[in-house]
Image (tube, rainbow, N blue to C red):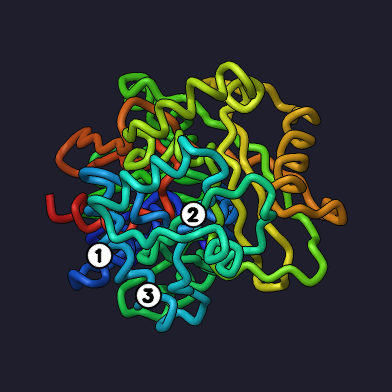
Amino acid sequence: MCRVSDSSSSSDLIVVGAGIVGLAHAVAAVERGLSVTVVERDERAVGASVRNFGHACITAQTGEALRFAEQARDTWLDLGERAGFDVAECGTVVVARSAEELAALEELARHREVRLLTPGETRSAAPVSADGLHGGALLERDLRVDQRRAAGAIAEWLATRPGVRFHWSTPVLGVADGLVRTGRGELRGDHVVVCTGHDLDRILPDAADEAGMRRCVLQMLQLRAPGLRLDPALLTGTSMLRYPALARTEGARALRDRLREQRPELLAASVNHMLTQLPGGDLVVGDTHTYARTPEPWSSEEFDELLLAETRALLGRDDLAVVRRWQGVYASADGEFLRARLSPGLTAVAVTSGIGMTTAFGLAPAVLDS
């Protein structure tokens, strides 16, 4: 790769980070007729943009996140067609296995586009066990994205657009107003947007400190489930405690009280037990959450076993085999988004609530237009 400090390196916008949030800013810039340079320390995206569920949970967001998610939905569908990766309008099935969970879904259905399901309809929509099943709901607006292909496909498509350049395997050493210093030389542009997620403190530590940013570490599993077919994403009661439109219901508050007494291990691990299916048939299962500025470097086998046991009970199957285990990491701070205008030509942006896939393509246009 050639050095980047030459006269052709000037762009209207320089994006630091080629994950989904960075790529969303590049896409929004191209739509506005701007020239764009994207700088990425790795040779491809390997962080939160590929270590997730591939789930755009639109319906259960609130406020600004809901507006961003609705806008991002249209962009995902368009990009899937243009860049050649799978985006499925298959929705989300939320399973209710208690009276409190069913009450939460019924409350959500009063003010959102949600179709309540009987126990039989729930089992027709998702292969869950009938044991203790009270019903469910279909969140029809939600999407499923091929998360392990999407970022790479979007980058490949962007690279064919006029005025777009990528510098892969290029570490960023520092940023300033309209300037990016890399291990391969300097890049200059009218504006720099830093989209490095939980690693913002590596480049702009003061901005990360001011936001109170920490790293949220997730434990996730890939499970082989012979013969199982799951088109929609699948959420459970613990998901109702994390997605804001559900978490604010009386049913979810009652559920949290009951789990505090009967299943405290789920709350201690901050479990959001949900499933999606990869194109090859394996299930992506997660996830647990721990928070620290500098997390411990090892995983908890207890957390993995908890996820596996919950999945076996949910599906009523004992033949699930672990194929892969991994940790995901995303930025966490007060609020759902960090947008810090540090100088006229320098902005830091991060999704600080684990909903980057859901909202990035709505967030990025708002950042550029501001």
Residue tagged 2: 136
Residue tagged 1: 29
Q: Residue at x 39, y 47 (%)?
A: 105
Quadrant showing the N terminus: bottom right
Residue 84 versus residue 286: which sits nearer the camera? 286
Q: Residues within 10 Å of mark 1 (few under 14, many from 20)?
A: many
Is any part of residue 173 visible from this angle? Answer: no
Disc 2 residue type (three-letter): Gly
Residue tagged 3: 77
Please state if 359 lies on the left or on the right of 274 as rendered: left
Is residue 186 positioned above or below 27 on the image? Answer: above
Q: Residues within 10 Å of mark 2 (few under 14, many from 20)?
A: many
Disc 1 residue type (three-letter): Ala
Q: Residues within 10 Å of mark 3 (few under 14, many from 20)?
A: some
The answer to whether marks 3 and 2 mark residues whose Cβ atoms lie closer than 8 Å is no
Image quadrant assignment for residue 163:
bottom left
